[in-house]
Image (cartoon, rainbow, N blue to C red):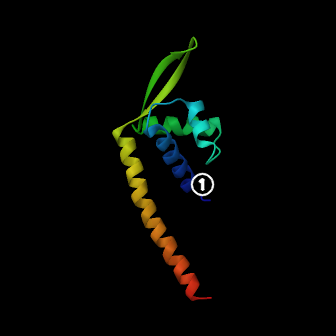
């Protein structure tokens, strides 16, 4: 898969995990695991990029005498998910066209 496309898809997956409630890194990995494998280094790179893009807010919370970063999606992050879903519908339409054309050439 093209690297840029995969990176973009992973970003949307991370935003989707965070959409419903604030969460932290290890929980994000666990939530994504049934669908896609993501390493900690990849996840934290994505989280940093999303934070810099103002798609996430970060809050430090003490947990078991340690500080843990909790990530919460912003309106900009929600808009990014919406844009992606519209983009993906277009991609599905193109895919269906290709499959239909393939079927006529058999």
Lateral position of residue 36 relative to residue 83, left or right: right
Residue visible at 65% across and 45% down in the picture: 37
Give the x, y percent position of residue 98.
53, 77
Q: Is residue 64 above or below residue 2?
A: above
Please name the residue shown 61% across and 40% down the image: 42
**Residue 4 image-quadrant placement:** bottom right
Q: Which percent across, then down, holds residue 81?
A: 42, 49
Residue 20 or residue 83, whichever sits in front: 20
Instruction: Identify whether 15 is placed above or below 26.
Output: below
Residue placed farthest to the left in the image? 75
Which residue corresponds to the image point at 44% horizontal and 33% vertical from the top-left?
21
Quarter that holds the N terminus:
bottom right
Q: Which residue is labeled 1 in the image?
A: 3
Residue in the image at 56% along x and 36% along y: 28
The image quadrant where one finds the C terminus is: bottom right
Looking at the image, which is closer to me, 100 or 83?
A: 100
Can you tell which quarter of the image residue 52 is in? top left
Mark 1: few/some/many CA within 10 Å (<14, 14-19, 20+): few
Name the outermost residue toward the top: 65
Number of numbered discs on residues = 1
Above or below residue 96? Residue 52 is above
Relative to 55, residue 3 above or below: below
Dot 1 falls on a residue whose secondary structure is: helix
- Residue 73 placed where, x, y %? 41, 36
């Amino acid at each position: 898969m093209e690297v840029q496309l995969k990176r973009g898809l992973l970003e949307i997956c991370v935003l989707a995990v965070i959409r419903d409630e604030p969460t932290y890194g290890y929980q994000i990995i666990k939530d994504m695991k049934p669908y896609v494998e993501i390493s900690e280094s990849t996840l934290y790179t994505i989280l940093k990029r999303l934070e810099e893009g103002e798609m996430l807010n970060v809050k430090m919370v003490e947990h078991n005498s340690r500080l843990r970063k909790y990530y919460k999606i912003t309106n900009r992050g929600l808009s990014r998910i919406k844009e992606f879903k519209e983009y993906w519908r277009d991609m599905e339409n193109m895919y269906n066209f290709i499959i239909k054309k393939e079927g006529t050439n058999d």
